[in-house]
Image (cartoon, helix red, strand yellow):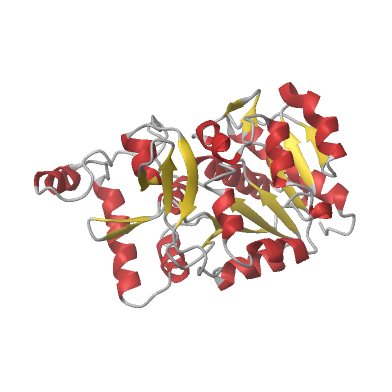
Amino acid sequence: MRITVLAGGVGGARFALGLREAARRGLAGLADARIDIVANTGDDLWLAGLKVCPDLDSLLYALAGVNDTDRGWGRAGDTERVNAELAAFGVGWPWFTLGDLDIGTHIARTSMLQEGASLTEATARLSARWDLGVTLIPVTDDDVPTFVETTAGDSMHFEEWWVRTRASEPAARFVQRGIEVARPAPAALDAIRGADIVLVAPSNPVVSIGTILGIDGIRAALADASAPVVGVSPIIGDAVVRGMADVCLPAIGVATNAGSVGRHYGSRRDGGLLDGWLVDPVDAGVVDAVEEAGIACRAVPLWMSDPDRSAALAVDAIELARGLRADVAV
C-alpha cells in the first residue's frame, strides 16, 4: 500500500510519527506500506545566505529522532555559538534563533542547491543520513515564501510575523510570493497520483495545507486521484492543538472549529479536497453538519500524546479511507 500525507511542520511531524509507528507495528496491515510526506514549503526563507526550510526540517528532525521536543523546533541539545556570532556582525534576524547543528543542515542544503540540485534532491540527500521510514518530498522546488499583510498595512515574512511580533498585528491576508508561476515537484505529483490513500495531516489549514493546495496542479492531481482523501482536524474543542491556525483562519473567514475547517476544505464530490474527516469526540456535535456537506465524518480521539495514541489515530484515518474505497488493498 502507498500512503501519501500532505503536511506542515509540528502537527504534520506528530502525525507522520504515528503513521510510521503503526506501519512498524504492522497495525491495520500497514507493515509493508510506503509512506510519502508531501511537505509545505511556504515557510521557507533565505537567511544569512542560507536556505532555511522550517517545515521540512521539523519533519526531518522528528522522524530522525533528533528534534528538540521541549522547544518544539530545532535539534535536541543544540548550541547557539554561530547564531551569536552572526548577531554580533549584524547578520540575519537576532530574534530568529538557529542552533549550530541546525545551521549545519542549512549549509548542507544550500551547498547542494548551489551545486545544481533541486530542493527535492537536496531533501533526499539530507534524509539519507537517517532511517526515516518515510520519504520527505517538498511540494515544489520553487521558492514560494509566505508574506503576511496585516490589518495595519504592514507586510512581512510569515516567520517574522509569528516569531518576532507573535502575531500581534492581525493578518488581513497571506500571500505566497511566486506561487502563480511555481510548479509542483514531480515527485509530489507522483506521490499523489500513485497513492492508494491520501491523508491530510492536522496542520495549519491556511499557511501549510493552504500553500500546498495553492501550487498549480496539486488540486487537480487530488481531484483526479483514485485514492480516497481523509483529513484530520487540527482543531479540538474550538482551539488549536499547536501552532497558530486560530490567528490565521479569520483572515480567510473561517471559524476556529473542527466543523468549519472540514467544510472549508470541502467535499471532493463538490470540487473540494476531502472524502473523509476525523474530529475529536469533544467535537462530535459537528459530525452531522460535515456529513451534510458531503464528507464522511467520524469522531475519534485526536490527541497524539504518546506513540500508542498517535498510531491509533493513524489507524483510524486508514480505516476510514478503506471504508470509503472498498478496493484499497491491505
Instruction: Please say if 8 is above or below 163.
Output: below
| Residue toward you, 315 or 130 | 315
Seen from this angle, which residue lies furthest right?
326
Percent coordinates x, y for residue 116 in the rendering: 36, 78
Q: How many marks?
A: 0
Task: Reply above or below: 302 against 153.
Answer: above
Q: Nearer the viewer, residue 159 or 108?
A: 159
Whether residue 45 can be seen here: yes
On screen, residue 38 versus residue 170, left or right, reads right
Q: Is 142 in front, or is 77? A: 142
Q: Is residue 110 above or below residue 84?
A: below
Q: Is residue 194 visible?
A: no
Assign the C terminus to one quadrant of the image.
Answer: bottom right
> For the view shown, which residue lies furthest in the front direction?
153
* Side of 191 where 127 appears, left or right: left
Position of residue 66 relative to residue 45, above or below, is above
Determine the image quadrant of residue 311. Answer: top right
Residue occupying the far left of the picture: 89
| Left or right of 173 on screen, residue 16 | right
Image quarter (top left, top right, bottom left or bottom right) of the N terminus? bottom right
Give the left or right position of residue 136, taking residue 1 as reference: left
> In the image, what residue occupies the spot 58% across and 70% down?
187
Point out residue 190 in the picture as x, y percentages from the top left corner.
Answer: 64, 70
Q: Position of residue 222 (x, y in %)?
A: 71, 61
Q: State which quadrant residue 271 falls in.
A: bottom right
Residue positioned 81% across, 31% down in the render: 287
Q: Residue at x 37, y 33 (%)?
A: 71
The x and y percentages for residue 244 are: 49, 34
